[in-house]
Image (tube, rainbow, N blue to C red):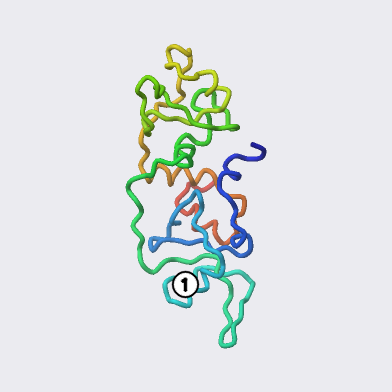
Amino acid sequence: MDGDFRTDFVRDPVALRQFPALVLNADYRPLSYYPLSLWPWQDAVKAVFLDRVDILAEYDHVVRSQLMEIRVPSVVVLREYVKPRKRVAFTRFNLFLRDEFSCQYCGAKHDLTFDHVLPRKLGGVTSWENVVAACAPCNLRKGSKTLRESGMKLRTQPTRPESEQLRNLGRRFPPNHLHDSWLDYLYWDTELDA
């Protein structure tokens, strides 16, 4: 796969390319970091009109209707708190995020797939504790052998991630587009440079 895997993995919807709004929960934290919680400007304006969000920052761009004029929101905060999920869905994307988009055998960050640590033919199941991100060459090399048989070692032991752990990992992989007005809300609790 050409390009940066993280960027290519999450498609870039056309509606978000122009004036996306960063969506914060009522506690002023993004609903998600990776993919970043963004709404198309049309949804943000609709939410403002329906009184579901407050505007924290705006673009210079203005949209008009027959009766009103509004600056396009760049950061909105929900008026009602949305409780984050405690259980993390077992998806390919979440698995790659848990493993920081790198092969758990050699550390490569390209051509990723996933591998059953204990092969399925030997009774291995598809679970957080038995599946890791692996580059295609390592996956091919290991095949359907055990770690001992293949002579390979894991960089980290696979575990079921907590939702907070994935949110924190997602913060390490910012999207291609970060508007200046978003920075204070995305990284407000990180250590400042001296």
Amino acid marked by disc 1:
Ala
Q: Which residue is mark 1?
A: 47
Between residues 144 and 152, which one lies in front from this camera angle? Answer: 144
Vertical side of 45 occupied by 119: above or below = above
Neighbourhood count class around disc 1 (C-alpha, 10 Å): few under 14, some 14–19, many 20 upward: some
Res 137 → quadrant: top right
Q: In the visual, does 78 lie left or right of 56?
A: left
Q: At x 35% / y 51%, what residue is drawn?
A: 85
Quadrant of image for the N terminus: top right
Res 141 → quadrant: top right
Residue 53 point in image, percent of width and height: 44, 70
**Outermost residue to the right:** 2
Q: At x 56% / y 85%, what residue is drawn?
A: 68
Q: Secondary structure at mark 1?
A: helix
Between residues 45 and 178, which one lies in front from this camera angle? Answer: 45
Count of marks overlaid on the render: 1
Q: In the visual, does 20 lie left or right of 121?
A: right
Q: At x 55% / y 70%, what residue is drawn?
A: 42
Vertical side of 86 occupied by 150: above or below = above
Residue 66 point in image, percent of width and height: 59, 87
Residue 43 point in image, percent of width and height: 51, 69
**Outermost residue to the front:** 121
